[in-house]
Amino acid sequence: MTRNPHDEVAGLLLAAGAGRRLGGRPKALLEHRGRPLVEHAAGVLRAAGCTRVHVVLGARAGDVRERADLAGCVLVDNPGWAEGMGSSLRAGLASLGRTGARAALVSLVDQPGIGAAAVARVLGAYEDEASLVSAAYDGVRGHPVLFGAAHWPGIAAAATGDRGARAYLKEHAAALTLVECADVAEPYDIDTEADLRHLE
């Protein structure tokens, strides 16, 4: 039987932040194309081929559950979301640890310029539990990032504050496969009021 990488790689969407620089508006609830941004981001992971998607929620999680259509996704509450992205990454990886997934394809809720084409490229570079893959934009590492399960314990240990997996990826740069995506995606973040112009 042929191995289907889409069954082995789970999408992991980090969507817990409070949007402090946006006046306390959680990014998950920002409108994009008439729907909450978290709904759009989960749809991108599905469109790229992730049959399983886990979404980590934090700030105003109740409102996100109410307003966004995340049917078919596993919703993971991160009570420690205020500590930063690292805590959400740990919560998400812990939720995947019980699923049999062999890799996590991690994306961020506030990057609507990264669509299914870029995510699918990163997914396509998956080989096995030792895989470590990142999208790159003109040679610079960005998101999404694919972590084979062999890396999860090390990433969880290193993920503190808002750094996420940055320190781990730097330490394991020799094992990291970069997949160029600048021709199909724009890696801007929605961080400030000025960035809201990117939303439709």
Image (cartoon, rainbow, N blue to C red):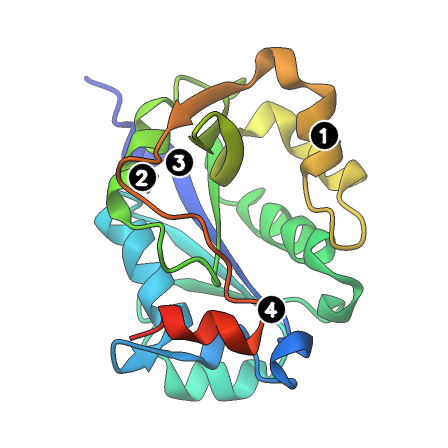
Question: Considering the numbered disc 1 on the image, is that residue within a helix, a strand or a loop?
Answer: helix
Instruction: Report, in whole angstroms, how far the alpha carbon at label 4 lies from the one at label 2.
Output: 22 Å
40 sits to left or right of 128: left
Q: Residue at x 45, y 31 (%)?
A: 136
**Does 8 sit above or below residue 59?**
above
- The amino acid pointed to by label 1 is Tyr
Instruction: Provide residue 67's location: percent of width, then percent of height.
Output: 39, 87
| Res 16 label | 4
Mark 4 touching mark 3, by CB under 8 A? no
Question: Considering the numbered disc 3 on the image, is that residue within a helix, a strand or a loop?
Answer: strand
Mark 1 touching mark 2, by CB under 8 A? no
Observer able to see residue 54: yes
Instruction: Report, in whole angstroms, how far the alpha carbon at label 4 lies from the one at label 1.
Output: 21 Å
- The amino acid pointed to by label 3 is Val
First of labels 4, 1 by sequence position: 4
- The amino acid pointed to by label 4 is Ala
Instruction: Report, in whole angstroms, how far the alpha carbon at label 2 lies from the one at label 3.
Output: 15 Å
Residue at the left extreme, as displayed: 1
| Res 9 label | 3
First of labels 3, 1 by sequence position: 3
Q: Residue at x 37, y 31 (%)?
A: 122
Q: Which residue is mark 1?
A: 168
For marks 4 and 3, give the one nearer the viewer. 4
Neighbour class for label 2 at 10 Å: few (<14), some, many (≥20)? many
Instruction: Provide residue 120's location: percent of width, then percent of height.
Output: 28, 37
Question: Considering the numbered disc 2 on the image, is that residue within a helix, a strand or a loop?
Answer: helix
Question: Considering the numbered disc 4 on the image, is that residue within a helix, a strand or a loop?
Answer: loop
Q: Which residue is mark 2?
A: 118
Q: Residue at x 54, y 17 (%)?
A: 130
